Amino acid sequence: MITHKLSDTSDIQWYMFGRDPQKPEKIIDTNQYLMVSNGEALLMDPGGLELFPAMLAAVVNIVELTSVNNVFASHQDPDIISSLGLWDGCLPRAVLHAPWLWEGFLRHFGMEQMRYNGLPDEGETIKLGGRDVQFVPAHYLHSSGNFHVYDPASKVLMSGDVGASLEPGNPDLFVEDFSAHCQYMEGFHQRWMPSNRAKLDWIKRVRQLDVQMMCPQHGRVFVGEQVTAFLDWFERLPVGSGIK
Amino acid sequence: MHALPKGKVCCGHPALNQKKALAWRRQKVDFTANTYLSREETIQPTMQPTHVIAATAASELAKTTAVSQQMRLTASNARAVAARAGEQGKSFKAITPFVDELAAISVSRVAEVVAWAREFSQLASRYQQVLGANNAYQKAELLLAGKRSKQLQLAQEQAAKALFESKQAQEKKLAQMVEALEALQRQLRSGNVIATLSFVEAALMPLEQRGDLNSVGEMIVASVAQIRQHNTTALKLLRSMQGNL
């Protein structure tokens, strides 16, 4: 599992985990994220069962597990959070922040010790190490109950499946040529994102935020002007292609 | 039945030729010869994971619930037949409490064992989950290459404890079920005796009343045979797990 420090200000660090060379071939590659704020950690979309050992080892290499008292699941998909039962075993005091809509479903992955904080549809802000962390609504992108994470201090947006790309081989961590990158995002967004209305609502919301780095759950990370380029591209893209 | 490719060894027995391998497989099929194994692909139950065998045994036992209820109806019918036969059915009437007792025992024992089997199946599935967690924590520890994490250690200890407790609970429940099923099998033997008594009493009755008494006996024989068949299959599956958990 590759660990990459994405952002490092005096009191907040962002880490990305992914491109695990041990990952079974037929499993989709995923990016996991960790935000550490003044010694307190938030683990975001920690991944599936298959990734758990590598993810746990990667996290422990950065922080003591006692610091990880917050876990976030953007939605209910197995590649996002099917490892929940295993994290529950080693983060007994942690809180899982996830859409209220999915509580009864997510508990199927096993959750005996952690506490579930059902995020309301309009979103929520929590304190992590004294700093604000916002859970931004992203409903129907692609899941009917869906959130992203925004850190206003670092200006990082963890954007779940929005901005995801399916690229063959072992792609780099960052988008280099945005135009060339679009081909790897187009099919994914057209098919996985069901609603143009939801898409426009999210774009409007995100345009009001100051985002310097946009971190999707699959594929490459967008930095600086690429974020705006992505929002413009996404705005033009018709989605919901499954309906013929 | 799928034949083994020529020259292919069978399950670690290199000396077995194809013919012997087929015979060996057939023997494994006979081990659980019943309807659910009519598809011969479902062979070698001893090689199945415990939670799968447990679920199969639970499903097999669940089939006996309806049959035991049927036995209760037979008991009611026996009382009605005895009442209709009047003075001539006095001897038959003396048999009906035994039919009642057999039906009551069957219904309660079957319900108890079916509930235990479901519980055991859940325990076995839970064991697989805990085993998975245990393995995942061990892999993580290896990846950490000696770096200690108290929390991980705690999680490992909890998983190991849960694994031990789960195994113990399974063993206990398994022994309980085997014992209960063996007891039920013994009790079911009395069903044949009661049925035989019904046939004897029927033979002593006027011709027009024999049919009713015979049908009571036939119903008992049929119900007992069905329950026994499912129990035998379940027992074999459960016994195959004893000492192998």
Image (cartoon, coloured by chain):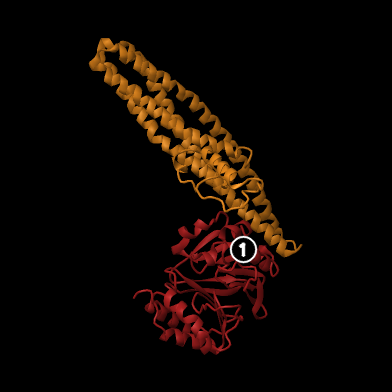
Chain colours: A red, B orange
B106 versus A141 height, above or below:
above
Q: Quadrant of the N terminus of chain A?
A: bottom right
Disc 1 chain ID: A
The structure residue drawn at horizontal position 64% and vertical position 38%, both measured from the top left corner, is B243
- The image shows residue B213 at horizontal and vertical percentages of 30, 19
Horizontal relation, residue B216 to residue A144: left or right:
left
Judging from the image, what secondary structure is the residue with disc 1 in? helix
Horizontal relation, residue A60 to residue B192: left or right:
right
Observer-nearest of A134 and B144 = B144
- The image shows residue B71 at horizontal and vertical percentages of 37, 28
Observer-nearest of B83 and A89 = B83
B20 versus A227 height, above or below:
above
| Residue at the limit of the structure toward the left, as seen here | B208
The structure residue drawn at horizontal position 51% and vertical position 31%, both measured from the top left corner, is B181
Image label count: 1
Observer-nearest of B84 and A14 = B84
| Residue at the limit of the structure toward the top, as seen here | B87
Q: Quadrant of the C terminus of chain A?
A: bottom left
A189 versus B204 height, above or below:
below
- Are there few (<14), some (14-19), or many (20+) residues within 10 Å of tag 1? many
**Which of the 4 image quarters holds residue A48?**
bottom right
Horizontal relation, residue B232 to residue A7: left or right:
left
- The residue wearing badge 1 is A52
- The image shows residue B5 at horizontal and vertical percentages of 57, 53
- The image shows residue B147 at horizontal and vertical percentages of 75, 63
B85 versus B77 height, above or below:
above
- Residue type highlighted by circle 1: Phe
